[in-house]
Image (tube, rainbow, N blue to C red):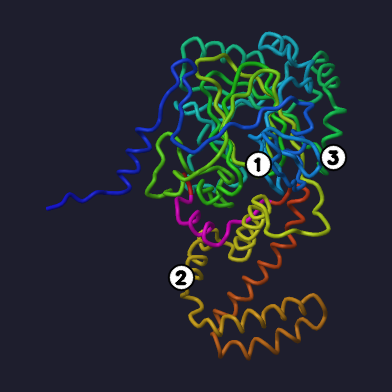
Amino acid sequence: MAEVVDPVSTARKKYADGITVDEKTGIKNYPLKLQPIPRLPWEDPHADHLMTQEALTFFCSGNRVISSTGSSLPPRLRTSTSEPQPVLLTGSNLIAPAMKWTLPYLEQHMGSNKHTVYISKDNRKFKFYDEKKVIPDSGFREPMRKREWTFSKFADELRKRIAKNDSEAIYYQDALTDAVGEPIKHDFVHFNWQWLNERKKRYNWGQLTSNLLLIGQPGNITPCHFDEQHNFFNQVYGEKRCILFSPENFHRLYPYPVSHPCDRQSQVDFDEPDLERFPNFQDCEGYECTVRAGEVLYIPMYWWHYFESIPKGQETISVTFWYKSGPLPNTIEYPLNGQQKTAIMRNIEKMLIEALKDPKEVGPMLHAILDGSLVSDLGSLVLAMGAMWVVVAAARGAAGKVVVGALVPILVPMVGLVQVAVLLLLLLLVVGAALLLLLVADGRGAALHLAAVGAESQQYDTHA
């Protein structure tokens, strides 16, 4: 009798066998399709081309690539895109005054105020969560503990844990405010704000929202997640490895539901992925780089990223610059890019949660729609959707109520009351989601799961 081969077990073993560890750095190399992030001098105009949202057209000329602007790019940057791309900027003087920010220097000048410090749970992984989304008695287990320490206490603890290679790691993360000492303020004021303001204007971004100071011990990991703002990530001290994935990998990284405390985080453990629950993960395609002191990594909004302080390195110190997205353009070009799709998906999920009042009902409803159990007759569906479009268009005016009152009695006998209600809700969600792209423009929007992906996310653990 032929032996039955379990494809999931085979895939799991193949992935595990494909993980290698670099002897020099201690970094794990995962069996994913990764390519180097473009590394360019910070004043190179090609870097602006990658970071801007303008679409560029490229054509070959010998061993060079000529852009629609007339400038040439190396062959490795042959790409055409309508959304920003990550780029690693070298030789930057963006935060030159901060390059002396060693742990002793900061300990001397940060002041006596308390700062936010996180403690991992024996795995050096810092999966962030939203305390406001934690439901009492829900069974949610905090993936890390939060403390408020003076900087001196943090520095002492950091040295102790590095000395004994403690797996219960700590990670400092707090905003740079006027509560710091005068020398830190002086350094901050003398960052290269001219360069930043020029980029903000050139890329049509919104306001700068915060600057975070990040300090961690070797081997600290920030699991894969995405943010809803653009980020200039500056490395001050030590080295960090970063893996990035475009928004097009949304369905391969299985984000938690919007209502979950770990919203925007991937459910997948890169070290031991559950390929039965998350089979698409092994098809991820992304980029990787090592960010060294003095370098700046641009992370576009909605791009997934995974950070790790070099395990066999030093403590790491980083400074971030977070910017909101700019206003929505007057015209929207199709097909939509990955950022826009992510925004739409998240907004639809948020609206469903608001309409149903119970996040646990979102997944079953989406599955029911996809399975065809709510609408079985295609002709009735098309007719009903057409009628609903008229309803939505009319509903903006005073005549909306009259139109709704006239159409609903006609549609109910055709497709049923429940189906009409669902179709009306869905159409309102679609139209509303398009309007809610405006929220994305100012950084408040948090996109939507496509129906299928949203359903997949909702069917997994509500809390982890």
Question: Mark 3 against mark 2, which lies toward the viewer?
Answer: 3
Provide residue 232's location: percent of width, then percent of height.
Answer: 72, 31
Give the crowd class for mark 1: few <14, some 14-19, many >=20 residues within 10 Å.
some
Marks 2 and 3: in contact by CB < 8 Å?
A: no
Distance from Cα at disc 3 to Cα at disc 2 = 46 Å
Q: Which of 229 and 66 is in front in this view?
A: 66
Q: Which residue corresponds to mark 3?
A: 202
Image quadrant assignment for residue 122: top left
Vertically, is 246 above or below 218? below
Residue type at mark 3: give it: Arg
Provide residue 397's location: percent of width, then percent of height.
Answer: 82, 78
> Tag 1, which secondary structure?
loop
Give the magenta-colored segment's residue range: 446-462
Q: Which residue corresponds to mark 2?
A: 371
Vertically, is 169 above or below 14? above
Marks 2 and 1: in contact by CB < 8 Å?
A: no
Q: Which callout, 3 or 2, points at the residue further toward the start of the chain? A: 3
Distance from Cα at disc 3 to Cα at disc 1 = 21 Å
Picture residue at 77% right of the left edge, 50% below the top = 441
User: Quick check: 45 left or right of 171?
Assistant: right
Q: Which residue corresponds to mark 1?
A: 227
Image quadrant assignment for residue 413: bottom right
